[in-house]
Amino acid sequence: MNPSRNGTVLVVAVLALVAGAAHAGVIRGTVRAPATGPSRPSLDPYAGNANAIPGAAAPAPGRITDAVIWVEALPGSVAAALPEAPGRRRLVQENQMFVPRVLAVPLGSEVDFPNRDAIYHNVFSLSPVQRFDLGKYPRGQSRTVTFRRAGVAHVFCDIHSNMEAFIVVTPSRALAQPDGTGAWALPELPPGRYALVLWHPEFGESRRAVTLPAEGDVRADLAF
């Protein structure tokens, strides 16, 4: 074998990998909420309040941080190459609330439900995406659910009616939630045309097509 030729092939291969990585771009933007505020209230389906924490209150609806943005469909090879989110995914029961109120996770995720309050809580959902009832358990204990279907699971505690959360199960790890200013960014993706989904528990759902160019990022500002 010709060592010089082997070296040339190796250099070409490395350059191809570097070029491929350089062509990845980011879709980013901001989300703007309606000026009129929430268009519909969250559900409050029953009047449970046993063993409540004095002064406990539900988080205000309509926060922009409760929005979720994701890519509707990705090629399998692209989806598999996206990085895993660090740490365990948790929906915490704390101060008689679910924290965070909206949790976005990719398909197949395990979600822990730890109880950090000095009272019993329950976690259940009747949503078609994932029906479960974890029973009542005290502070220091946790339960886990694996989410195997994309969609939105509406979560409650059957003891405290003010406790409400949403677990948004996305088709892949190409997802984001905005910060307090509404800014968001998806993970790096190869060039192409993507269908973005924007969802919020009060403001509903919308879709938008975005094209990521061969080089560079693209901005996609969204509004409900």
Image (cartoon, rainbow, N blue to C red):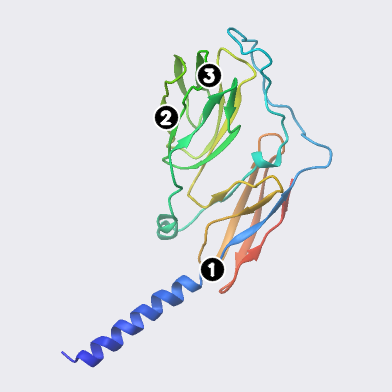
Image x and y of residue 99, in percent: 57, 30
Callout 1: few (<14), some (14-19), or many (20+) C-alpha neighbours within 10 Å? some
Which residue carries the number 3 mark? 117
Image: 98 above or below 138: below
Task: Look at the image and tell me in which quarter the N terminus lies.
Answer: bottom left
Image x and y of residue 129, in percent: 50, 32
Q: CA distance from mark 3 to mark 2?
A: 20 Å
Looking at the image, is mark 1 or mark 3 nearer the viewer?
3
N-terminal of the pair, mark 3 or mark 2, is 3
| Residue shown at 63% from the left, 52% from the top | 184
Q: CA distance from mark 2 to mark 1?
A: 35 Å
Identity, as a three-letter code, of the amino acid under mark 1: Pro
Residue 211 visible in image: yes
Image: 91 above or below 104: above
Callout 3: few (<14), some (14-19), or many (20+) C-alpha neighbours within 10 Å? some
Q: Which mark is residue 145?
A: 2
Residue 127 visible in image: no
Looking at the image, is mark 3 or mark 2 nearer the viewer?
3
Q: CA distance from mark 1 to mark 3?
A: 47 Å
Secondary structure type for disc 3:
loop
Q: Nearer the viewer, residue 211 or 7?
A: 7
Secondary structure type for disc 2:
strand
| Residue shown at 54% from the left, 68% from the top | 191
Task: Look at the image and tell me in which quarter the C terminus lies.
Answer: top right
Q: Nearer the viewer, residue 60 or 199?
A: 60
N-terminal of the pair, mark 1 or mark 3, is 3
Q: Nearer the viewer, residue 121 or 70?
A: 121
